[in-house]
Image (spheres, helix red, strand yellow):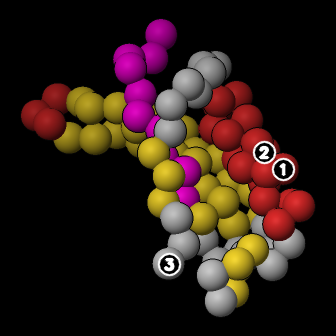
Amino acid sequence: MMKKATAVLDFGTSKVLVLLAEESAYQKVTITSAGMAQYDGFMNGEWNAPGDVTDAIASAIEAAENKVGTHIKEVYVGVPG
């Protein structure tokens, strides 16, 4: 059984990445899972294909969850600048 994990969602220029991590000994962080999904990115502060962003997020979260057999309830989000 996995300890309490922290989930991070990051929007890159061409992919959505979800990382699950937990604190291990000596205040180190261990990445326990990752999920990724391609998407069309963003330009000038707007999504290139706004209708596809939700699907990419869901796919990346599902991939990360399936690797460790858990359900993500909270996530920290990195928003593109």
- Residue at the spot of label 2: 59
Question: Distance from label 3 to label 1 (Cα)?
Answer: 21 Å
Q: Does the magenta stretch include residue 9?
A: yes
Q: Nearer the viewer, residue 19 or 74?
A: 74
Quadrant of the image occupied by residue 50: bottom right
Which range of residues does the magenta coloring cover? 1-10
Dot 3 falls on a residue whose secondary structure is loop
For image coordinates 69% across by 67% down, the residue present is 15
Q: How crowded is mark 3: few (under 14 residues within 10 Å), some or many (20 or more)?
A: few
Q: Which numbered dot is residue 6? A: none
Dot 2 falls on a residue whose secondary structure is helix
Q: Which of 44 and 4 is in front in this view?
A: 44
- Residue at the spot of label 3: 81
Q: Do the residues labelled 1 and 2 touch (CB within 8 Å)?
A: yes
Question: Distance from label 3 to label 2 (Cα)?
Answer: 23 Å
Specify the amino acid type for callout 2: Ser
**Can the viewer see residue 18 in this picture?**
yes
- Residue at the spot of label 1: 55
